[in-house]
Image (tube, rainbow, N blue to C red):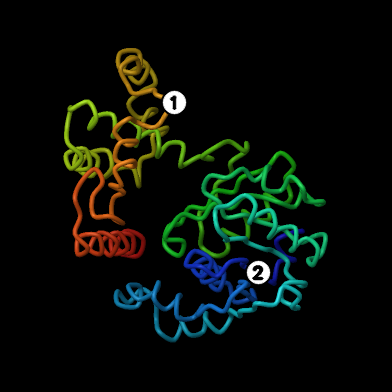
């Protein structure tokens, strides 16, 4: 299916990520968006909640919000016309292999053979999710980053059977709704961005575990140094900027001393076993009050809005 043929969008899964994904697609006036879930859910209410800070900042006009909500429908009927006529489906159900496979099996039995299927997963293999489908060439991974209505990146992940046309069409659709799609050519654990993110987390946790610095200091070191420029200067461009010769020399000296464990950190394991799970329990690497956790989430959204829309 080509981009020009995509008109009807189905989002399978009405949780917060599914609602936000539906809102993203509603930015294209030619799209008719439907959210499917097995139970009744307040899609407009969830989207209004997600968009509250956008409205407060004047980034989103109330009239525009209502207009976009008018392009989003909802159904609990898997045999509805909205499901059968879908041109592109984005699945956003639980991160459970069985649930995802069952969802797509039911969809494939109802959708047209040319319908494009997308799975919004941050870690699971699109190849494995689609293994039992008949039309595997029209299946692709689409990893939306949370919060889905704010973070521009979507990783388009080719499975071992995804056609080039399917990947290209999805890339074009995502670009048309304001996203920054990137193509992951191989189906590998973590795709692109999470592989880099968790390489950083592994080193950060190791620094704390080995008594080099405490958790708060590690975060400050990131926020007020290379973290400031990452939004503008990526690692590959930075390496070219300083020179591949200097990059080689630095790596020749430092890489042997960096954390390279293939298992979760013993410190992280200890925190998990002790029930110190971070925000949800009030203590992880640091201690958190309910007020601090709420402030952190609000500050993140405000930062993203200011950075993207100022």
Q: Nearer the viewer, residue 85 or 171?
A: 85
Q: Residues within 10 Å of mark 1 (few under 14, many from 20)?
A: few
From this view, report whether residue 200 is shown above or below residue 250: below
Q: Nearer the viewer, residue 66 or 289?
A: 289
Which percent across, then down, holds residue 254?
30, 17
Residue 150 shows which numbered tag? Answer: none
Q: Nearer the viewer, residue 76 or 298?
A: 76
Q: Earlier in the sequence, mark 1 or mark 2?
A: 2
From this view, report whether residue 130 is shown above or below residue 33: above
SS for tag 2?
Answer: strand
Which percent across, then down, holds residue 108?
78, 60
From this view, report whether residue 40 is shown above or below residue 198: below
Q: Residues within 10 Å of mark 2 (few under 14, many from 20)?
A: many
Corner quadrant of residue 242: top left
Which percent across, then down, holds residue 283?
23, 50
Q: Marks 1/2: CA distance?
A: 39 Å
Which percent across, then down, holds residue 226?
27, 38
Corner quadrant of residue 205: top left
Residue 262 shows which numbered tag? Answer: 1
Q: Nearer the viewer, residue 145 or 91?
A: 91
Residue linked to disc 2: 10
Residue 214 falls left or right of residue 228: left
């Amino acid at each position: 299916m080509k981009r020009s043929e995509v008109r009807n969008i189905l989002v399978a899964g009405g949780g917060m990520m599914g609602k936000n994904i539906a809102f993203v697609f509603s930015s294209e006036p030619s799209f008719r968006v439907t959210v499917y879930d097995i139970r009744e859910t307040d899609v407009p209410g969830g989207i209004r909640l997600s968009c509250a800070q956008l409205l407060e900042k004047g980034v989103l006009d109330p009239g525009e919000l209502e207009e976009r909500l008018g392009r989003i429908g909802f159904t609990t009927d898997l045999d509805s016309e909205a499901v059968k006529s879908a041109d592109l489906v984005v699945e956003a159900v639980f991160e459970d292999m069985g649930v995802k496979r069952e969802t797509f099996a039911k969809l494939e039995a109802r959708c047209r053979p040319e319908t494009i299927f997308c799975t919004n997963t941050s870690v699971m293999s699109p190849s494995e999710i689609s293994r039992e489908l008949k039309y595997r060439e029209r299946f692709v991974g689409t990893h939306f980053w949370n919060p889905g209505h704010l973070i521009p990146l979507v990783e388009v992940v080719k499975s071992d059977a995804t056609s080039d046309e399917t990947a290209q069409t999805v890339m074009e659709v995502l670009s048309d709704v304001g996203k920054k799609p990137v193509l992951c050519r191989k189906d590998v654990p973590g795709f692109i961005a999470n592989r880099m993110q968790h390489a950083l987390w592994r080193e950060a946790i190791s620094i704390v575990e080995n008594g080099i610095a405490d958790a708060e200091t590690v975060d400050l070191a990131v926020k007020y140094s290379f973290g400031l420029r990452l939004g503008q200067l990526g690692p590959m461009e930075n390496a070219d900027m300083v020179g591949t010769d200097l990059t080689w020399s630095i790596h020749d000296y430092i890489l042997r001393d960096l954390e390279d464990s293939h298992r979760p950190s013993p410190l992280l394991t200890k925190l998990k076993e002790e029930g110190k799970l971070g925000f949800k329990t009030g203590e992880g690497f640091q201690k958190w009050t309910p007020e601090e956790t709420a402030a952190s989430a609000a500050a993140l959204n405000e930062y993203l809005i200011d950075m993207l829309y100022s």
